[in-house]
Image (tube, rainbow, N blue to C red):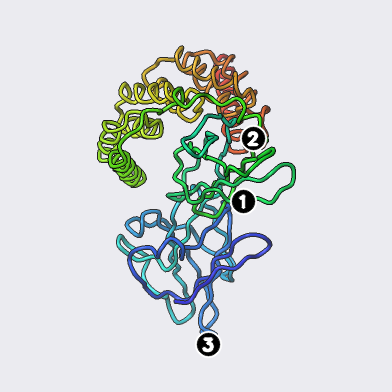
Amino acid sequence: MNRNITSRHGGLVLLVVAASLEAATPPPDHHTPKIQSRRFEIEYRVNETALPLTRVELWYSRDGGDTWHNYGLDEDSQSPIQFDAAEEGLYGFFFLLENRVGSSGEPPQAGTVPQQWAFVDYTPPIVQLHPIQVGRGDALGTRLQLRWTAIDAHFDPRPIELSYRIAPDGEWTQLADRLSNTGRYDWCPPTQLEGRVVVRLTARDRSGHRVCAVGRAVELEKITATEEPPGNAPGAEELAPTDQKRAETLFRRGMVHKERGEYRQAAARFQEALAINPRQPEALVNLGETLYFRREYVDSIEAFEWALKLEPGWTGARRGLVRSLMVVDRYDDASAQLAHILKDAPADAEAWLTLGDVAVSRGDELMAREHWQKATMVDPTVKAVVERAQARLDSLQRMAVLAGASRK
């Protein structure tokens, strides 16, 4: 079966030919068409010598062909047919075509192989680059502690790229690529680098969305004059090289298990890494997230709290702590953590959104409405957060209308 992807009026168009069967598993990810919108067109065509089509029926599957759903008929039986994706993820498609001679086959059943695949992801990542914190590295000199929050349901395994330039208009230079989304990276700038430096973070997801966040310029000369003594720097205790390497290897293995959803194995690897080197905030945060997924909320809270003792400015760790606190109904503590985030970043829409969620969990719908309205206004660039906040406000409004109608 021949097919390819083209672009029509800025939207992706999926081309499908005939109805032959292929391998039961999806093609490699880089060969799967990526679609960045809810609505797109699927084109189909038959042999030039075939009689005109009298019926075109489209089926789709969300689980690789185990379950099929009838999407409907193409009313004019002429390519293309418009498809609306109800949710994101991998789709398999199957066409039934008919003309006066007969049908191309039977409707797909459990185990029928899709004729074409497509990965739908219409939500760009949410990215925030936090204020740069400064310390001293080892023999390399100044160390810039780069911290970020990047949220997306369909990230690549290593979705983060970091680059820098000399302000105000220097050329961007890559400093790291294909990083895991750990939320942190320590960078020792080249000793010859001087002046005001700007750092940019780029996050990319599987469908090709690329979202950038640019931090404020940092004056390297001023940093050098105010560095902390090496003995006071976090993690000043040196591990033996073999221990450091072993801890890093265990952490990477934990990340692989976590990305696969193997949370029991991931937690074990993170704990082994921390037994060797307890001063690993990134291991603690990922352990906290893994324990949250395992519903071990008390231990998750402890891991996040230890991470914040090592990295008090790590907003991603604080968000994870808030999520675990809310599950165990510790709303006062969750509110305090969110207030800490908003003190440093008053325009953090995600924090305002979550603060509204805390309020509604307490039964304070008036306060929830105020916080959600704030989330829709403080930073219009984070469209996904704004949409979620607006959806919550709309839901409150519908509930109020229904409550009013029931009293009449």
Examine the rendered structure and indicate whether residue 53 appears above or below residue 238.
Answer: below
Q: Determine which quarter of the picture holds residue 378.
A: top right
Observer-nearest of 198 and 314:
198
- Disc 3 to disc 2, how far (Cα)? 71 Å
**In the image, what residue occupies the spot 36% across and 70% down?**
106
Q: Helix, strand, or loop for circle 2?
A: helix
Question: How dense is the environment of label 2, judged by Cα within 10 Å: few (below 14), some, or many (20 and up)?
Answer: some
Q: Is residue 146 above or below residue 50?
A: above
Point 42% across, 74% down: residue: 19
Disc 3 on helix, strand or loop? Answer: loop
Say which label, 3 or 1, has the lower sequence index.
Answer: 3
| Element type where label 1 sits in the image | strand
**Mark 1 burial class by Cα count in 10 Å: few <14, some 14-19, many 20+:** few
The N terminus - image quarter = bottom left
Numbered circle sitting on residue 344: none
Q: Position of residue 384 (x, y in %)?
A: 58, 38
Q: Is residue 273 above or below residue 25?
A: above
- Identify the residue at horizontal 65%, vertical 50% (top origin): 172
Which of the two residues, 13 or 136, is positioned nearer the viewer here? 136
Q: Tell me the CA gap for discs 3 and 1.
A: 56 Å
Residue with the mark numbered 2: 220
Q: Vertically, is 406 above or below 129?
A: above
The x, y position of residue 359, in whole percent, is: 52, 16
* Dot label at residue 49: 3
- Distance Cα–Cα, label 1 vs label 2: 16 Å
- Left or right of 216, for residue 361: left
> Which amino acid lies under the numbered mark 2 shown in the image of this protein?
Leu
Read off the residue under disc 1: 173
The numbered mark, 3 or 2, whose residue comes first in the sequence reads: 3
The amino acid on which the numbered mark 3 sits, given as a three-letter code, is Thr
Q: Quadrant of residue 101?
A: bottom left
Quarter of the picture holding the C terminus:
top right
